[in-house]
Each structure stands twice: as C-alpha cells, then as structure tokens.
Image (tube, rainbow, N blue to C red):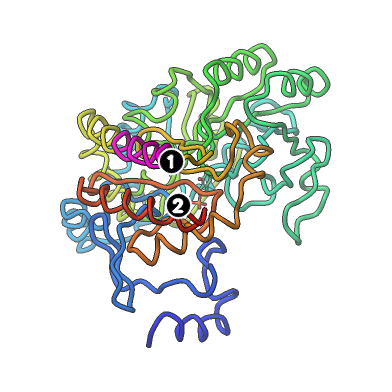
C-alpha cells in the first residue's frame, strides 16, 4: 500500500489519521519507511533531506550508531524498573554540569509533563496562582497553557474541553514588548507565580529575543518575587552546550527540557534552583509522578547523546547553520523578495513576511498560502520541512554540505514557484 491508501484507512481508525495534529497535511502526509542520519524515506520510494527532524528531538541525526548500540545493550537488561538506577544520576549530573540554573533535576516523559510540573512547582513555591505566558508560545498540550494567543485580557482556552475556570489564571502578553509586561506586572504582579518563556520562540517559526529582553525578564521577575521559567524544550542542548541560558547569559529559576535530551526517545525534565526543586514530592508538598519517568532506555539514549554533544560539535553545527542561512539570504536577495530569513545555530525559517518578526502578531501576518506552495515544492524536490509557516526548521550534526546544497537549490526553486518568478 502507498501513503495515500494508508492515510485513507488511518483516518477511520486514528482521529485525523495522525497521532499529533501538525503531522496531517493536504492532500495526505507521507508514511515513513525509515530514517537514517539526515534523511527520511517514505514508503512511496521518496528520499528527503530531513529538516523537520521529528519537530526537534533529532540532533545527531536519525538512529546514531553509537546511541543505538548503547540503547540495544540497555534493552537486554531491562526497559522499565520502577526503582532508581545509576544512569539517572549520571544524566542528572550531566544536565547540572551544562545548564547554568540547574542544581537539581527531575525526569519526566515529555515536554508537556515538564512544563505542567514546573508551573505547579512555581505555584507551590510562591503560593500564588496566576501565570504569564507569551502570545503564540507553545508549552505543550496541557490545560493551563493552551490559552488563546491574542488579547492579553482574554484568557480563553484554545481548545474545546478546557473549562474557562482552568485558564482564568493564565495571562498572556506579546513577546519582546517591555511595556506590555511592565504594565501587566504593575496590575497583577503580586498574584503572579511565574513567567514561562521560550527564550527563542520556536512554535511560531523562529523568533529571537531582542538584545535586552531576556535581561529585562530576569530583572522584573526578581524584583517582583516571580519565578522565571525558561521552556528550553527546543533550545535545550540544541542552541548550545548549556542551551539558551548559556547562549544569552541569562539564568532563570527553573528550566524545562524534552526533545533533544532523549536522544530520539521520549523524555522530559525540569530543573532549577535547589531551594525550589526540594519542594517536589516525596521531599516536599508539590506532587508529581510518572511510571516511565527516568526509564532506563530514554535515560541511556540521553546519556549517550549528550556524550557526543561537546563544544566542537556545536561550533560545527553553527557553521552549517550559517552556511545554509547565508545561501538562503543570497537567493532571497537575488530574487529581490521581501522575506525574512531567520534563525540561529541549527534553527532556521523563512517568514513570508515583509516585516521583521518580533512577536506572534507580526508572524501571523505572513503569507501562509504562498508558504504552502513553497512547502509542497520542497517536498516534491526531496526536502522535508514542517508543513507550517509557524514551525521551526532544523539541521542535525548528520547533515552534510551536499545535503545543505540540495536544500538551498530546492529552496530557490520553491521560492520561484511560490512567487511566480
Ligand atoms: C514541543 C514543545 C513542548 C511540548 O513537548 P512534548 O514532548 O511534545 O510534550 C513544550 N514546549 C516547547 C517549547 C516545545 O517546543
């Protein structure tokens, strides 16, 4: 059977035919046969350079041989224990050694779980209820953070099935806007437990903080007794050795991880100041638990992956990212297109937008119709990116210069098609 036929069947037995919404695209998503290194192959015989990379987890490339060997060995001696094992300490120590704010670490199973637990912890620590997130920021699929991005006053849920009473304590403001947050804290500061932020917004494309913004966040939270949470589910172990907080030199109180930390397997973690982390059960009164938390497979995959992510690795990855972004910028300039080529390190995107994208409001004005023409043409020419203007594209350590040249050529082609040139 081919992808089209499988999707037809899938739609009848799996809602929308997929197990996570963004994977569905028109007319049907390709079904994967296998993925190796920088490439992903579908069952219809196509081979793509993969810049989706599972939406972020894959940093060494698919099925890195060293990691797979270690995981295979671990599989022979157990896959879930329900009791501690030494590797959990090793991975926790590795996180602590790399990440400036991490003094203690608790492992969970996904980014969603990590942010849910970190927000509960911030509330438990401060005794306050309100939380602040940024418009367009994604912190997973749990009730407290699925809040309509738009007007800061309206804390309406983004999804059916979430009571308004659940989200009435979730406030949102535009990213990179000092005034909006200053005003909100003036009004609500004493009721705010935490501000949760993606230091680089990776779920509306790729939006960097302005030079002073993260510093401003650190100062205003400190002054008002608000816990600052960096959601580094994308940036953690991807942007640099110690994540965005090392890259930008700003230390939050708590941090959440997932994606890259699992080396291709499901994991999540939250970490931060000891004084706060010690409130987690069974030590303290903030409950959080998980059957598969710290499972030996994901932990081993994470350990084996981090072992390979040293400073030279990140230097080389950044060099590849710069090469690709420069190529794309040259193409955009030659074609005289008014587009925004954005990104840093191994993250990149093109905004089909004439304006510099600083926040969700501006990102939303992008030309998504043209983007979809561009996406489909890339796919046709063997390059897989996420099917949305509002996702980030990635590169991995496994991407060769040949891959990046192929990607650049496909992008040139796709831009010409999208703009009728
Ligand atoms: C992907 C993502 C999450 C959710 O992680 P899951 O493992 O999909 O639950 C949370 N925060 C950010 C910033 C993410 O990109």
Q: Position of residue 151 (x, y in %)?
A: 79, 38
Q: Quadrant of the N terminus?
A: bottom left
The relative height of residue 350 versus residue 251 in the rendered view (above or below) is below
Tell me if 185 is positioned left or right of 299 in this view.
right
Q: Which mark is residue 133?
A: none
Task: Give coordinates of residue 63: x percent, y percent.
Answer: 24, 58
Q: Is residue 412 above or below residue 238?
A: below
x 20%, y 48%: residue:
400
Q: At 18% from the left edge and 53% from the top edge, which residue is drawn?
A: 70
The range drawn in magenta is 321-335
Q: For the residue carrying disc 2, how many other residues have a C-alpha within 10 Å: few (<14), some (14-19), or many (20+)? A: many
Where does the image place residue 148, in percent across and percent down from the top left? 74, 47
Secondary structure under tag 1 reads helix
Indicate the position of residue 81 as horizontal and vertical percent values. 34, 57
Residue that badge 2 annotates: 415
Mark earlier in primary sequence (2, 1)? 1
The answer to whether marks 2 and 1 mark residues whose Cβ atoms lie closer than 8 Å is: yes
Which residue is located at x 72 percent, y 31 percent?
173
* Side of 56 where 368 appears, left or right: right
Left or right placement of residue 202 versus residue 326 in this view = right
* Secondary structure of the residue carrying numbered label 2: helix
Looking at the rendered structure, which numbered label has been put on residue 332?
Answer: 1
Magenta-colored stretch includes residue 334: yes
- Magenta residues: mostly which secondary structure? helix
Q: Is mark 2 within 8 Å of ligand 1?
A: no
Q: Is residue 269 visible?
A: no
């Amino acid at each position: 059977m081919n992808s089209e036929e499988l999707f037809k069947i899938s739609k009848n037995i799996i809602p929308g035919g997929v197990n996570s919404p963004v994977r569905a695209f028109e007319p049907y998503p390709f079904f994967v046969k296998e993925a190796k290194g920088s490439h992903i192959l579908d069952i219809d015989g196509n081979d793509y350079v993969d810049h989706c990379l599972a939406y972020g987890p894959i940093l060494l490339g698919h099925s890195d041989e060293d990691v797979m060997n270690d995981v295979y060995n671990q599989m022979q001696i157990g896959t879930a224990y329900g009791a501690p094992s030494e590797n959990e300490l090793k991975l926790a120590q590795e996180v602590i050694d790399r990440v400036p704010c991490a003094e203690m670490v608790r492992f969970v199973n996904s980014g969603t779980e990590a942010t849910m637990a970190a927000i509960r912890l911030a509330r438990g620590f401060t005794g306050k209820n309100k939380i602040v997130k940024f418009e367009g920021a994604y912190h997973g699929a749990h009730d407290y953070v699925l809040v309509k991005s738009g007007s800061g006053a309206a804390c309406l849920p983004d999804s059916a099935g979430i009571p308004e009473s659940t989200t009435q304590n979730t406030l949102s403001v535009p990213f990179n806007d000092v005034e909006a947050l200053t005003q909100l804290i003036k009004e609500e500061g004493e009721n705010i437990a935490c501000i949760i932020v993606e230091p680089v917004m990776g779920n509306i494309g790729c939006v960097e903080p302005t030079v002073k913004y993260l510093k401003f966040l650190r100062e205003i939270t400190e002054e008002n007794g608000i816990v600052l949470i960096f959601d580094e589910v994308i940036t953690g172990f991807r942007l640099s050795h110690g994540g965005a907080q090392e890259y930008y030199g700003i230390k939050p109180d708590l941090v959440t991880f997932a994606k890259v930390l699992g080396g291709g397997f499901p994991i999540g973690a939250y970490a931060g100041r000891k004084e706060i982390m010690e409130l987690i059960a069974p030590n303290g009164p903030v409950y959080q638990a998980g059957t598969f938390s710290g499972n030996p497979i994901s932990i081993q995959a994470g350990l084996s992956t981090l072992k390979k992510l040293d400073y030279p690795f990140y230097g080389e990855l950044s060099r590849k990212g710069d090469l690709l972004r420069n190529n794309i910028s040259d193409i955009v300039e030659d074609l005289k297109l008014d587009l925004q080529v954005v990104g840093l390190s191994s993250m990149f995107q093109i905004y089909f937008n004439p304006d510099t994208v600083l926040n969700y409001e501006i990102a939303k004005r992008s030309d998504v119709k043209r983007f979809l023409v561009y996406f489909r043409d890339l796919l046709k020419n063997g390059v897989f990116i996420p099917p949305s203007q509002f996702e980030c594209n990635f590169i991995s350590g496994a991407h060769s210069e040949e891959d990046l040249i192929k990607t650049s050529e496909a992008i040139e082609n796709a831009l010409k098609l999208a703009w009728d040139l």
